[in-house]
């Protein structure tokens, strides 16, 4: 999913971030993480893991923001 423009010296790699959100009433199992197929920009097929967060809207938002920070910490050196 990484694309580096070779025309610019020192150009940073470019990426595509795939995500989806859905807020449902009630709770769902947060122990099962199904994987769904995703068509990537290069035409290949990848997989995306779906995660469930239960709580109030504010609790879910806080957890989501923490997860986004953690995701980018993992890829900090990319």
Image (cartoon, rainbow, N blue to C red):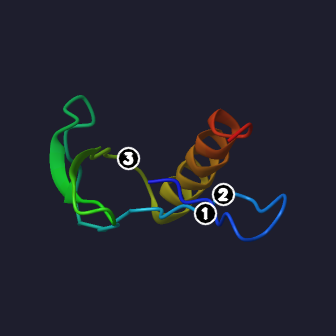
Where does residue 38 sit, x and y in percent of width and height?
A: 21, 57
Q: Is residue 42 left or right of residue 8?
A: left
Q: Which residue is mark 2?
A: 13
**Quadrant in the picture for the C terminus:** top right
Q: Which residue is mark 3?
A: 53
Where does residue 34 sit, x and y in percent of width and height?
A: 16, 39
Q: Residue furthest right?
A: 10
Vertical order, 41 against 49 (above or below): below
Q: Camera-side residue: 64 or 1? A: 1
Q: Alpha-carbon distance for marks 1 and 3?
A: 29 Å
Q: Alpha-carbon distance for marks 1 and 2?
A: 4 Å
Tell me the SS state at disc 1: loop
Q: Which residue is mark 1?
A: 14
Q: Are marks 1 and 2 in contact (CB under 8 Å)?
A: yes
Q: Residue furthest front?
A: 7
Q: Are marks 3 and 2 in contact (CB under 8 Å)?
A: no
Identified at 53% across, 53% down, the residue is: 64
Q: Is residue 35 left or right of residue 11?
A: left
């Amino acid at each position: 999913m990484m694309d580096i423009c070779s025309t610019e010296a020192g150009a940073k790699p470019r990426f595509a971030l795939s995500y989806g959100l859905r807020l449902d009433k009630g709770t769902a199992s947060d122990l099962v993480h199904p994987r769904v197929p995703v068509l990537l920009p290069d035409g290949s097929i990848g997989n995306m893991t779906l995660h469930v967060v239960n709580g109030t809207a504010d609790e879910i938002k806080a957890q989501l923001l923490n997860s986004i920070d953690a995701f980018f910490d993992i890829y900090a050196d990319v």
